[in-house]
Amino acid sequence: MNSPLYSIRMHATRQGQHLSGAEHLTPAEQLDALAAKLVRRALEHPRGTPESIQLTVDLLEAEAVQRATLPALATLPVTTVAQGRQAALSALVEAGVSPAVAQAGIDLLISGAAPGGGVMRGAVLMQAVSGERLEADPARGVRVSRMDLDPSAATTLRQQLAVRGLDNAHVREALVLAGKVLLAPGMVAELCWSDDPDYSAGYVASPTFGYRRFPHLKPLGEERGGRIFFWRGVASEIAAVVAFLERTPVLFDALGELLPDLPSPQEA
Ligand code: PML
């Protein structure tokens, strides 16, 4: 029998604004070590010192934990932010987002998706055809939670990513989060770039092509970033998709393909 798992989540704030968040699914024996690691991570965030750090721990029912496979990963090696955003726009359209909505999504992350132009704690949920924003609270958004990589899959993933120079927490955690997002019914695509001023990369993920990275989706030094989930559901299905994203535990125990780099825009 599998040992019971706990969900442990960290959320740090500064001046009432989201600063940092991270989480794991773990057996009891590793809870205290992970708690210390998550607090350290909040304290070392490049956007500043937290004024509040919350840790939340919940025991999960073993039968509630879904097992899943990570999406395939490929990098499109753009060399400028303009190229990256153009390539992200094309990827969103390829995934099935309407062109005007894809452009509006990119513009929203550029200007800051929270009211007043700040960084949201969670993600925007956007109707993929009409562009309507569907999240109940546009400052909080939808907070994808309760997902992790199984330890043996994590070891293999790190070895594979290291060969490409990609073994860092941004890539590992974003791949797991995107993996869960793509399992949500009706999901068309996710667009993300980091709010870490030292990290310029981002991605578009879709059920059709997996996780497609772009090394430059924002200029270094820029603190605005975030996530948009482009979704094709109807109003009566919003509560169910949000419940899945926020509460259903998903443990990834198998890896997707690590694909060769895609042709860069200069080569294509
Ligand atoms: C984040 O860490 O805030 C999001 C990172 C997105 C890009 C990760 C990657 O390099 O693939």
Image (spheres, helix red, strand yellow):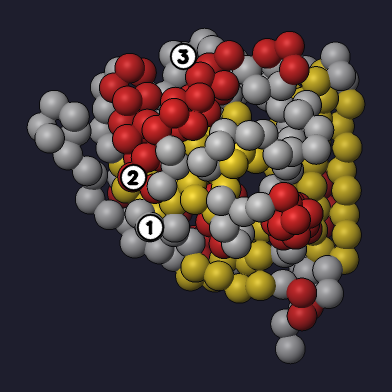
Q: Quadrant of the C terminus?
A: top left
Q: Which residue is mark 1?
A: 208
Would you say residue 209 is visible in this rendering? yes
Q: Which residue is mark 3?
A: 220
Q: Is residue 53 above or below residue 35?
A: above
- N-terminal-most mark, 2 or 1: 2
Amino acid type at image mark 2: Glu
- The tally of labels here is 3
- N-terminal-most mark, 3 or 2: 2
Amino acid type at image mark 1: Thr
Query: Is 116 or 13 nearer to us in this picture?
Result: 116
Tell me how far mark 2 sits from mark 1, CA to CA. 9 Å
Amino acid type at image mark 3: Leu
Q: Which residue is mark 2?
A: 94
Would you say residue 171 is visible in this rendering? no
Q: What is the x, y in percent for residue 63?
A: 77, 80
Q: What is the x, y in percent for residue 191?
A: 50, 37
Q: Tell me if label 2 and label 1 are in contact, CB under 8 Å.
A: yes
Q: Depth-wise, is mark 1 or mark 3 nearer the camera?
A: 1
